[in-house]
Amino acid sequence: MLSEYLPIAVFLVCGFGLGIVLLIAGTLLGPHKPTLSKNSAYECGFEAFDDARMRFDIRFYLLAILFIIFDLEVAFLVPWAVVLDQLGMQGLALMATFLTILTLGFVYVWKKGALEWE
């Protein structure tokens, strides 16, 4: 029974080994020219700050929420695609309705200018 797990163990050892070799090769062979801007922390599109209560643009929240909304459609499409043959035409029509509503929402957000970054 243990011999059935041998290919999985070989795959894991090869995967970890290759990952370590590539990390070491990148460290040794890659260019290393640190500058102040390269070493500084980059977070959320604006300079690092000391005060946690600093106000920043609401567009960061808006973009994050829009990403979550439109990214969730993929979470609904994958299981739907797996069982589409069992759902038949009714399942196809319901998903078409869902995608139509989602597309209309995307067009609305686009026309309102929520995706524009000045």
Image (spheres, rainbow, N blue to C red):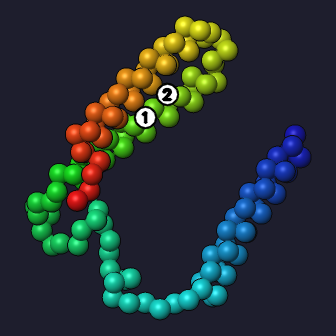
Horizontal relation, residue 4 to residue 83: left or right: right
Q: On the picture, is 112 further left or further right than 34?
A: left
**From the viewer's perspective, is residue 115 above or below residue 32?**
above
Q: Residues within 10 Å of mark 2 (few under 14, many from 20)?
A: few
Residue 45 percent across, percent down from the top left: 28, 65
Q: Circle 1 — which element?
A: helix
- Residue at 36% x, 43% y: name it: 67
Tell me whether circle 1 and circle 2 mark residues in contact (CB < 8 Å): yes
Q: Residue at x 49, y 27 (%)?
A: 76
Mark 1, residues whose alpha carbon is within 10 Å: few (<14), some, or many (≥20)? few
Which sits in the foreground, 52 or 86? 86
The percent coordinates of residue 96 (x first, y second) are: 49, 19
Q: Of residues 115 and 68, which is closer to you in this image?
A: 115
Report the amino acid beneath label 1: Leu
Q: In the picture, which quadrant includes the C terminus?
A: bottom left
Q: Which mark is residue 72?
A: 1
